[in-house]
Image (cartoon, grey):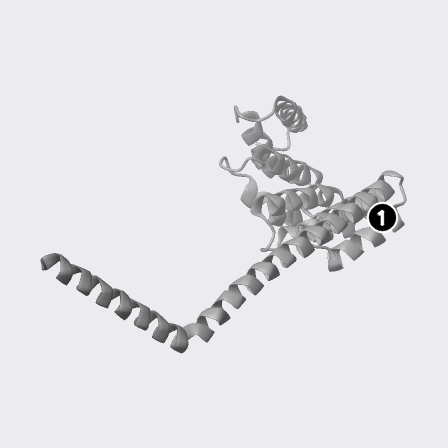
Amino acid sequence: MAKDDDSFFREVNEELRSDQLTYAWKRYGRVVIGVAVLIVVGTAGWRGYEYWDNNNSSASGDRFIAALDLAQQNKNDEALKALEAIEKDGTGSYPLLAKMRAASVQAAKGDAAAAAKAFGDVGNDTSAPAAIRDLAKLRAAWLLIDTGTYEQVSAEVQAMAVPANTLANSAREALGLSAYKAGKLTEAKQWFKQIAEDATAPRNVANRAQIMLDNIAASGKAP
């Protein structure tokens, strides 16, 4: 008897579950279908976007390489035109790379002021990675040694001339050379001394710093 009761209750439960499922499908079936369609469409859309993005990135890469080839052939005006086009409509990291390379091409053309400004613009672009910004500021500073003032060089790289920064000694050297050129020998001595006393400074940079310190000492114009 107990077994019959168990069998009866199982059948009732199955019927109830079946009725509930039928009711739920009648009430929510369209919603379920709609969600399923959205999932399928969304997945297809994402795959489509990935395909589009990859193709565009590949196209931008090809254009960037072609611009580099023009620059290597000293076709600077054509290279600049190609790089400026990538800056406007390139995808991924290529607009930023194009801007950096365009600044180098301007420097190669002898337009150091324009190149320094272009590098400075990248250095101030908060959307660019910090390492790229620092490198751009350093490039700007080195160009400004000849074309700008000590204050301009300092504005670009003084914040980098600290022990924690991997470009510290390059920044110090730019500051020291700019100060020396401006006749600010006390400041120049300070920067070159920091390089000479830094055990992590590359040997060639440290050697140049020591030469400058010897020149400053020989001048007798800095305490």
* Quarter of the image with the N terminus in it: bottom left
Q: 7 or 42: which is nearer to us? A: 7
Residue at x-position 61% and y-position 56%: 47
Q: Is residue 112 visible?
A: no
Measuring from the top left, give residue 190's x and y in whole percent. Answer: 56, 34
Drawn side of residue 24 relative to residue 58, left or right: left
Drawn side of residue 6 relative to residue 125, left or right: left
Q: Mark 1: few, some, or many residues within 10 Å (few <14, many ≥20)?
A: many
Q: Is residue 69 visible?
A: yes
Please tell me in which quadrant of the rendered image residue 184 appears.
top right
Drawn side of residue 5 relative to residue 98, left or right: left
* Residue type, label 1: Ala
Q: Which residue is mark 1?
A: 79
- Residue 19 lies, with reference to residue 113, above or below; the image says below
Residue at x-position 67% and y-position 36%: 177
Measuring from the top left, give residue 74's x and y in whole percent. Answer: 89, 41
Q: 203 or 35: which is nearer to us? A: 35
* Quarter of the image with the C terminus in it: top right
Instruction: Give the mark count.
Output: 1
Residue at x-position 31% and y-position 72%: 19
- Outermost residue, bottom direction? 27
Measuring from the top left, give residue 209's x and y in whole percent. Answer: 63, 27
Q: 208 or 106: which is nearer to us? A: 106
Measuring from the top left, give residue 87's x and y in whole percent. Answer: 74, 56
Element class at badge 1: helix
Residue at x-position 79% and y-position 55%: 84
- Outermost residue, left direction? 1
